Amino acid sequence: MDAGFALPRDGTEEDPVRLGVMISGGGSGLAALLRHQLKQPCCHQTVLVISNRSDAGGLRHAKENLVQHSVVPIPPGQDPEARRLQHEREVHQLLVASNVELVVLSGYMRILSPWFVERWKGRLVNIHPSLLPSFPGAHAHRDVLAAGVEITGCTVHLVDEGVDTGPILAQQSVEVTSDDTEDTLQERVKQVEHELYPKTLDLLCSGRITL
Ligand code: GAR
């Protein structure tokens, strides 16, 4: 295994890996994951949802599914680094208090510090809406359209200290059409993400992924 990445234990239906899902927005990915976990015997279970925004629409999916959820806003203050660390310390404490074993970033729009990554490395996974290493960053669809490429997609990867750079676990391509806008492309990529992410978590939480 790659040095520094400690993957989650093998879960079972009786003793599923405990997931903490982090969101910032509408949470369609969270909703797809919760549906997946309900409709079949599953080796992972969402036990906590954390949002950095109180207005994140995705919180509703946690409420409807009776999953424990918390809003952890960015604390006030002058120094952005101090605010980031304080925020991440709070998030980390909540994850530990809920015995979370794997942190799933699902539309979480903040970059995590090396402090946080070090604590969860190998048990911190993200989905990004492009075929990494192409088009990292917060505006993948816009960048894809500006570049004029014909194929894009999505990537599930372990998080390391870089931005959208950790070991890739799964990718799936999506065709870009000539009439695509950011919105239409985002929608089509999300449909693929909603299948790919839960299936990749099935593999990761049952020992079927090695680095
Ligand atoms: C998803 O497309 C996800 O890949 C992307 O945000 C969207 C969240 O949608 N994530 C990133 O861009 C991370 N940099 P959702 O809130 O409806 O699940």
Image (tube, grey):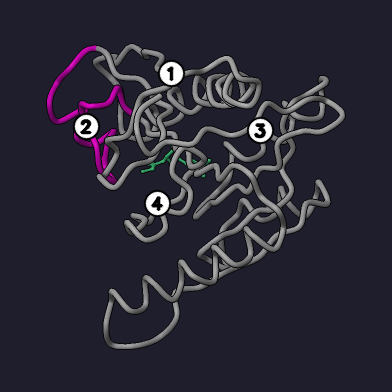
Quadrant of the drawing holding the C terminus = top left
- Sequence-first tag of 1 and 3: 3
- Looking at mark 2, is its residue's CB closer than 8 Å to ligand 1? no
Q: Secondary structure at mark 2?
A: loop
Q: CA distance from mark 1 to mark 2?
A: 16 Å
Which mark is drawn over residue 135?
Answer: 2
Question: Bounds of the magenta span?
Answer: 130-150
Find disc 4 in the rendering and name its residue.
Answer: 117
Q: Amino acid at mark 4?
A: Val
Picture residue at 34% right of the left edge, 28% below the top: 167
Q: Residues within 10 Å of mark 2 (few under 14, many from 20)?
A: some
Which is in the foreground here, disc 1 or disc 4? 4
Where residue 37 appears, as percent x and y from the top left, is 75, 29
Find disc 1 in the rendering and name its residue.
Answer: 170
Name the side, left or right, on which 107 lies relative to 147: right
- Sequence-first tag of 3 and 4: 3
The relative height of residue 120 versus residue 179 in the rendered view (above or below) is: below
Q: CA distance from mark 3 to mark 4?
A: 23 Å
Where residue 179 appears, as percent x and y from the top left, is 28, 20
Name the side, left or right, on which 104 lies relative to 159: right
